[in-house]
C-alpha cells in the first residue's frame, strides 16, 4: 500500500506537466484549469467561495487516492473508473437529448440547442473513454441509460448537479488515480471530459438564470463542439480548441435541432 502514496507536490508538478503536453493551450478560456490548478489557484475568489466544501473534498482526494483508500491497484482502479465514466457519459448524452426535446416542447428553443450541444459533447467523451478501454483490451458493455425527464427548469437543475459532481468530485478523483497508475491515455481522456464539464456547468447555470428571469431569448443559438475533446463553445469557434488544440475548422456546428 505504501508505494501508492502520492506526495501532493509531486502530483501538482506531474499533472501540470501533463496538461502542458496534452492541452498545449491554456488560452483565455477561464474554465480551462487542471484539477491541480483548481486546487491551488486562490485568485478566483468567486469559484473558491462557491466550492469551499468541495475544494476540501478535492484536497482529500489528492492526499488519499481512491486506489489507496480502497486497497486496490491504481491500474485496475483506473479501468474501473473509465468504465464508470463511460456509463456516466453515455447516460448524460441520452438524457440531454431527451431534455432538449422537452425544452423545445416547452418553447425554450435556445435551451433545447444547449442540451443538444452538450449531448453531442458527452457522446464524444463516452467514445474517448471507450477507446482508452479498448487500448487496454477491455470491451465496454451496452449501456441502457436511465433518467427521468421533468420540466426544463428541473432538468437544468439536474444537469447542473450532474456537471458539478463530475467537475468537482468524480473527474478530479479519477485523474488522481490515473496519474498514480501512470496511464497517459486515461489522463488525456479524463482531462478532456473534466475540462468540458466545467464549461457545461456554467452554460447550464446561465440558462437557468435566463429561464428564471424571462430572458431565454437572449441565450446563444449557435454552438461549436470540438470533435476531439467535446469542448463546447457558444456563438463562435476559435482558431484552435482551448483544450485539445484541434483546428476550429473541424468543429461540429449546431444551429438547429
Ligand atoms: Fe457535460
Ligand atoms: Fe478539443
Image: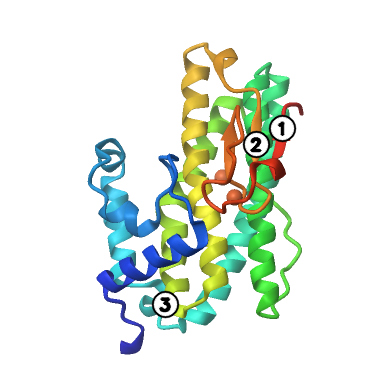
**Residue 42 in picture, x, y percent from top left:** 23, 47
Q: How many marks?
A: 3
On whether ligand 1 comes within 8 Å of the CB at mark 1, the answer is no
- Would you say 197 lies left or right of 98 here? left
Residue ID at (63%, 47%): 92
Relative depth, front residue between 2 and 190: 190
Within 10 Å of the Cα at label 3, are there few (<14), some (14-19), or many (20+) other Cα atoms? many
Locate the N terminus by quadrant. Answer: bottom left
Instruction: Report which residue position mark 1 lands on.
Output: 254
Residue 224 circle label: 2
Q: Earlier in the sequence, mark 3 or mark 2?
A: 3
Secondary element at tag 2: strand
Tag in front: 1 or 3: 1
Whether residue 192 is visible here, answered yes or no, is yes
Colour convention:
rainbow
User: Is 140 or 158 nearer to us in this picture?
Assistant: 140
Q: Are marks 3 and 2 in contact (CB under 8 Å)?
A: no
Give coordinates of residue 117: x percent, y percent. 66, 37
Q: Residue at x 57, y 46 (%)?
A: 241
Asked whether disc 1 touches disc 3, contact meaning CB atoms under 8 Å apart, the reply is no
- Mark number for residue 180? 3
In space, the residues marked 1 and 3 are separated at their CA atoms by 38 Å
Secondary structure under the numbered disc 1 in the rendered image: strand
Amino acid at each position: 500500500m505504501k508505494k501508492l502514496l502520492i506526495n501532493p507536490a509531486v502530483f501538482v508538478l506531474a499533472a501540470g506537466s501533463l496538461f502542458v503536453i496534452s492541452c498545449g493551450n491554456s488560452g483565455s478560456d477561464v474554465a480551462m484549469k487542471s484539477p491541480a490548478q483548481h486546487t491551488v489557484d486562490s485568485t478566483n475568489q468567486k469559484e473558491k467561495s462557491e466550492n469551499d466544501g468541495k475544494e476540501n473534498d478535492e484536497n482529500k482526494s489528492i492526499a488519499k487516492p481512491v486506489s489507496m483508500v480502497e486497497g486496490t491497484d491504481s491500474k485496475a482502479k483506473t479501468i474501473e473508473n473509465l468504465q464508470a465514466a463511460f456509463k456516466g457519459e453515455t447516460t448524460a448524452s441520452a438524457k440531454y437529448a431527451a431534455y432538449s426535446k422537452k425544452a423545445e416542447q416547452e418553447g425554450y428553443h435556445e435551451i433545447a440547442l444547449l442540451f443538444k450541444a452538450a449531448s453531442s459533447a458527452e457522446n464524444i467523451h463516452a467514445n474517448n473513454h471507450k477507446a482508452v478501454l479498448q487500448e487496454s483490451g477491455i470491451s465496454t458493455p451496452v449501456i441502457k441509460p436511465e433518467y427521468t425527464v421533468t420540466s426544463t427548469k428541473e432538468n437544468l437543475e439536474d444537469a447542473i448537479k450532474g456537471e458539478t459532481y463530475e467537475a468537482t468530485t468524480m473527474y478530479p478523483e479519477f485523474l488522481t488515480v490515473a496519474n498514480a497508475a501512470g496511464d497517459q491515455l486515461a489522463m488525456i481522456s479524463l482531462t478532456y471530459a473534466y475540462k468540458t464539464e466545467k464549461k457545461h456547468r456554467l452554460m447550464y447555470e446561465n440558462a437557468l438564470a435566463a429561464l428564471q428571469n424571462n430572458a431565454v431569448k437572449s441565450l446563444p443559438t449557435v454552438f461549436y463542439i470540438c470533435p476531439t475533446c467535446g469542448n463546447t463553445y457558444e456563438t463562435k469557434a476559435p482558431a484552435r480548441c482551448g483544450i485539445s488544440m484541434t483546428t476550429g475548422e473541424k468543429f461540429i456546428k449546431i444551429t438547429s435541432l
